[in-house]
Image: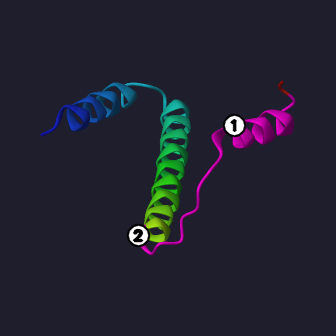
Amino acid sequence: MTVMAKTLERAIDEATALPEADQEKIGRQLLAHVEKLQKLRREIDKGLQSLDAGQGRRLDIEDFLKIQNARHGRS
């Protein structure tokens, strides 16, 4: 068993001692987190496939940061 699996198993064991409502909340939060990670993994895989197919393009990091900072109200 990997360290992560052991940690997850321990967390689940600890959670089972909590009231049912808390267990449900933890379960929902964990599932939401896993779903976000799965979505991110799909997006990364899609991007890698695009790059492998030669569809990538150069990125000017300075311009990218300026756009992102302007979008989020930072200078």
* Rendering coords of residue 63 (x, y %): 74, 42
Where disc 2 sits, the SS reads helix
* Rendering coords of residue 27 (x, y %): 48, 42
Q: Nearer the viewer, residue 36 or 16?
A: 36
Q: Earlier in the sequence, mark 2 or mark 1?
A: 2
Q: Are marks 2 and 1 in contact (CB under 8 Å)?
A: no
Q: Which mark is residue 52?
A: 2
* Rendering coords of residue 49 (x, y %): 44, 70
Residue drawn 50% across the image and 35% down it: 26
Q: Which residue is mark 1?
A: 62
Crowdedness near tag 2: few (<14), some (14–19) or many (≥20) residues, C-alpha within 10 Å: few
Residue drawn 48% across the image and 35% down it: 23
Q: Nearer the viewer, residue 51 or 9?
A: 51
Q: Start and end of the magenta stretch?
A: 52-73
Q: Which mark is residue 73?
A: none
Residue 5 in the image: above or below residue 15: below
Residue drawn 83% across the image and 24% down it: 75
Residue 27 on the magenta span: no
| Mark 2 or 1: the one toward you | 1
- Please give left or right for residue 66 compared with residue 58 in the image: right
Q: Tell me the quadrant of the picture where the N terminus can be found.
A: top left
Residue 34 in the image: above or below residue 12: below
- Please give left or right for residue 2 compared with residue 21 in the image: left
Q: Amino acid at mark 2?
A: Asp
Q: Amino acid at mark 1?
A: Glu
Where disc 1 sits, the SS reads helix
- Please give left or right for residue 38 compared with residue 32 in the image: left
